[in-house]
Amino acid sequence: MADEASVLKALESVAGPDGKSIVAAGLVSGVNVSGAKAFVSLTGDPARAKELEVLRVAVEGAVKTVPGIESAIVTLTAERASAPAAPPPGQAPQRKTIAAIEKIKYIVAVSSGKGGVGKSTTSANLALGLAAQGWRVGLLDADIYGPSAPRLFGLKGQPEVVGNKMIPLEAYGLKIMSIGFLVEEDVPMVWRGPMVAQALGQMLGEVAWGELDALVVDMPPGTGDAQLTMAQQVPLAGAVVVSTPQDLALIDARRGVAMFQKVSTPILGIIENMSYFLCPHCGGRTDIFSHGGARKDAEALGVPFLGEVPLDLAIRQTSDAGTPVVASAPDGPHAAIYKELAAKVKNLLETQSRKAPPKIVVG
């Protein structure tokens, strides 16, 4: 079976821009092997981007010669470069056209300032809710460190590659892509921020998404380099921020709203998840994490409040079982909540589009 050492051995034969082996020159910043797939990150000067792109292709070819390796993902990182600066207020960010997403009408980011607030479960059911409105919908699980889509949708196996494009897996009518389809569930992704950003770009640009009305992007939690790069380089139609009601979560949610506003991404609204708990035995209500904080923040920030989702056993059970509640119980009360949220998002996207059609500036 192939391992990191055998991949590094193969890379010793690849010469870098200065003629030296890329391994000896220190251009290889990371190697990770998972089954028959290898992940390699290269670090170099961003001013030599064209040379490094040629090198990336050469490295990919060398890695595929290793016995046991069937496919390779090679990413370019520029760790000496600073993160892209946010554009001046009121000015749209420079974004490159990505051919694979040209036929996607709306790309919607679902974000949270921190982990553990139910962002992935919300993303999955929101995507299903949009599909219930009659839309063609895809879901990109962009949480590289903690991919949830394989478990949420009960999907296993690797995507097929046709014409250098990965074919997204499908479940309940959604097209789905996740780094979790490419690595084993228990394999840690020990990647630096620039490599994560590069991988996200490849998962968008090297996937055969086809024609979609909406692509829901389950963003990584937080407001770091990966999130900022995604927000600046992808033509997002809007962002949905998920938070629980307590102050600790709302502080981070406000940071998330501020980040999207800095890169001129419209805020479609805030969702208060785990908003309240209804006892399945007595029907009594308990506000475990407080209540109403997300609504108050939305009003204070001047952004829409989309609604509340309860903390409920059925939502957790169906998510763990790979049968999201909107798909497994489409006529139930919880599915109705997510469908209502999706209807609001759909209406906001269509209204916004009529007022000001999004423009993609080739940078």
Image (cartoon, rainbow, N blue to C red):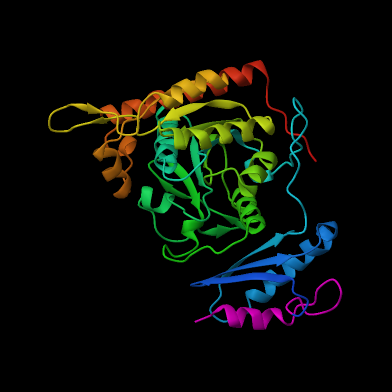
Percent x, y of residue 161: 56, 59
Q: Dominant secondary structure of the magenta stretch?
A: loop
Relative to 15, 206 lies left or right: left
Q: Quadrant of residue 132?
A: top left
Residue closer to the observer: 107 or 316: 316
Percent x, y of residue 179: 51, 56
Number of numbered discs visible in the structure rendering: 0
Residue 48 shows in this picture? yes
Percent x, y of residue 186: 42, 65
User: Residue at (49%, 36%) from the top-left corner?
Assistant: 137
Q: Quadrant of the C terminus?
A: top right
Residue 66 shows in this picture? no
Q: Note whether 166 is above or below 34 in the view shown.
A: above
User: Residue at (44%, 33%) from the top-left corner?
Assistant: 247
Asked whether residue 5 is drawn in magenta, I would say: yes
Relative to 344, 318 lies left or right: left
Q: Quadrant of residue 78?
A: bottom right
User: Residue at (52%, 39%) from the top-left corner?
Assistant: 113
Q: Residue furthest front?
A: 247
The magenta span reads 1-23
Percent x, y of residue 282: 13, 29
